[in-house]
């Protein structure tokens, strides 16, 4: 069994120092540039360092330029620290619901928030080895720390050095979007960039924004002991998701005790003593919420400043970031962009796919398209909400007729035995065929389940073929086979069924 408890001589500072030694060593000296690089990458987040690694594995001479910390938002202020908090938060929720499984609820459930955050830092330090400067250097990549700036058609300047390139990739990422709410800057607020440095769980937390970040952290902090309210100016959470999936999530968060305020605008924030008071408006109803901390998760803004993009003819705007075509080329065909600086969907696994596209197209004369990929994503609430491909409204907008096969998790044996029978699997096919064009899964393990459907879409496997896939019994993934069986049942009706009956009757 792996040891989780920290040794007695380790502290938060130790974990921070370990992490910094990996992602921005103090003693680091930028190397002397090569005469020319096949590829220079600006940005050391997932898109940047994966592209650099895959390019050098194919024999390219590569340089990577990072302004601050390797690993980007995902490793430092996003996926890794948030999921490290979600796991203990779910454990505390299970302890409080122990009676549902015949166990006695502990007489005192004491949340050790300091340890939760210490564990998060330890995990972050451990994972940082995968994106370390030493690892990149050992792979043959020249790593430069500093602000990268285009200095001509084929050169990037960093720390007084000029890196000449044949191709370049901009993967500079994004940062939290700042709220335009009167008084909030003066009152003070948190974003994901500062949240994971907190040492005490706020007694009352107001979350502004009902996207993936807001929903995940609202639920986690509630389960870790905060009195949480979440405000969303749209009529539902996760605005792009299936409406019934968003409703399932809303119901689950309400059961956790989160105060939910949809269709609500935050019009002003002020500070009164140690309290932060938010003035809210929902239709014509005005009310206030008092909080000790405010967390804002209203989206992100692409990092496009400071790189002198105008000098190399790279089109961008501050809202959407850098403009790219389907091959991830910018308006300058020698310069590519990938990741949060240009992507509508800001997920690290999309950056992984983008890395392959950039290497193939920029270095190997490929013509790979981002639009040809079936890329899933997941919001890691409880239950999780996962999706891949087209939504029904998108398919209809493209003129694609859709047939949907739905299995409710309360009909799945393993979900029933686990006490996790809330949610569904929806698989959309092009009507008249078994071609899968999209799917949504709302379930406790949706992030794991969606991968089977993604594989089928990527491999061109139809829903009918999934009916032939045997799953171990009982598993929650059985819901996918049940949806496939439902598709086959439609194939065995009407003319086909009548023909079979005639054949049987004739013998």
Image (cartoon, grey):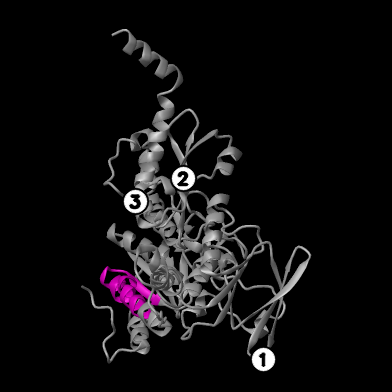
| 43 over 327 or under it: above or below | below
Upstream in the sequence, badge 1 or badge 3?
1
Q: Which residues are magenta?
A: 121-144
Q: Is residue 122 magenta?
A: yes
Look at the image and tell me whether residue 374 can be seen. Answer: no
- SS under mark 2: strand
- SS under mark 1: loop
Q: CA distance from mark 1 to mark 2?
A: 49 Å
Upstream in the sequence, badge 1 or badge 2?
1
The residue under the point 56% across, 65% down is 254
Q: Which label number is shown at residue 273?
A: 1
Left or right for 39, reference 212: left
Estimate the x, y position of residue 173 in percent, counting from the top left: 49, 67
Q: CA distance from mark 1 to mark 3?
A: 51 Å
* Quadrant into which the C terminus falls: top left
Q: Which residue is mark 2?
A: 439
Nearer the observer, 376 or 71: 376
Residue 276 figure quarter: bottom right
Q: Farthest residue toward the left?
A: 1
Nearer the observer, 198 or 460: 198
Tell me which secondary structure the magenta stretch mostly adopts. helix
Estimate the x, y position of residue 54 in percent, counting from the top left: 32, 59
Estimate the x, y position of residue 289 in percent, counting from the top left: 67, 77
Which one is in front in this view, the residue at disc 3 or the one at disc 2?
3
């Amino acid at each position: 069994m792996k040891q989780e408890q920290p040794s007695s001589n380790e502290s938060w500072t130790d974990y921070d120092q370990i992490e910094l030694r990996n992602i921005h060593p103090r003693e680091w000296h930028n190397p002397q540039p090569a005469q020319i690089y096949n590829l220079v990458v600006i940005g050391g987040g997932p898109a940047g360092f994966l592209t650099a690694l895959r390019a050098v594995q194919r024999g390219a001479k590569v340089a990577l330029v990072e302004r601050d910390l390797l690993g980007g938002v995902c490793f430092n202020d996003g996926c890794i620290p948030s999921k490290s908090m979600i796991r203990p938060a779910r454990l505390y929720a299970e302890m409080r619901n122990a009676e549902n499984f015949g166990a006695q609820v502990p007489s005192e459930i004491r949340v050790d928030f300091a340890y939760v955050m210490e564990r998060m830092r330890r995990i972050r330090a451990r994972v940082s080895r995968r994106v370390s400067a030493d690892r990149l250097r050992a792979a043959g990549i020249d790593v430069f720390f500093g602000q990268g700036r285009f200095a001509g058609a084929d050169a990037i300047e960093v720390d007084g050095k000029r890196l000449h390139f044949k191709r370049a990739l901009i993967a500079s990422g994004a940062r939290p979007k700042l709220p335009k709410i009167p008084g909030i800057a003066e009152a003070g607020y948190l974003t994901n960039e500062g949240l994971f440095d907190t040492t005490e769980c706020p007694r009352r937390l107001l979350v502004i924004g009902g996207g993936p970040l807001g929903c995940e952290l609202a639920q986690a902090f509630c389960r870790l002991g905060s009195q949480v309210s979440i405000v969303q100016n749209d009529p539902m959470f996760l605005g792009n998701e299936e409406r019934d999936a968003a409703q399932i999530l809303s119901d689950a968060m309400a059961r956790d005790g989160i105060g939910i305020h949809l269709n609500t605008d935050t019009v002003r924030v002020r500070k009164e003593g140690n309290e932060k008071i938010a003035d809210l408006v929902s239709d014509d109803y005005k009310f206030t919420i008092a909080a000790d901390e405010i967390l804002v998760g209203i989206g992100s803004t692409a990092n496009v400043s400071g790189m002198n993009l105008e000098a190399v003819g790279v089109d961008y705007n501050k809202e959407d970031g850098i403009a790219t075509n389907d091959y991830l080329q910018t308006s300058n065909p020698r310069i590519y962009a990938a990741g949060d600086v240009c992507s509508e969907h800001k997920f690290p696994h999309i950056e992984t796919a983008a890395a392959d596209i950039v290497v193939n197209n920029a270095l190997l004369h490929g013509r790979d398209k981002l639009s040809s990929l079936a890329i899933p994503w997941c919001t890691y609430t409880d239950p999780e909400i996962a999706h891949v491909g087209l939504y029904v409204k998108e398919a209809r907008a493209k003129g694609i007729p859709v047939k949907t096969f739905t299995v409710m998790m309360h009909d799945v044996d393993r979900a029933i035995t686990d006490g996790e029978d809330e949610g569904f699997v929806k698989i959309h096919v092009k009507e008249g065929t078994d071609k899968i064009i999209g799917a949504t899964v709302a379930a406790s393990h949706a992030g794991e389940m969606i991968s089977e459907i993604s594989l089928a879409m990527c491999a061109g496997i139809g829903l009918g073929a999934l009916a032939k896939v045997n799953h171990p019994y009982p598993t929650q993934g059985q819901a996918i086979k049940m949806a496939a069986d439902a598709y086959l049942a439609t194939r065995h009706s009407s003319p086909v069924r009548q023909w079979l009956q005639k054949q049987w009757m004739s013998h």
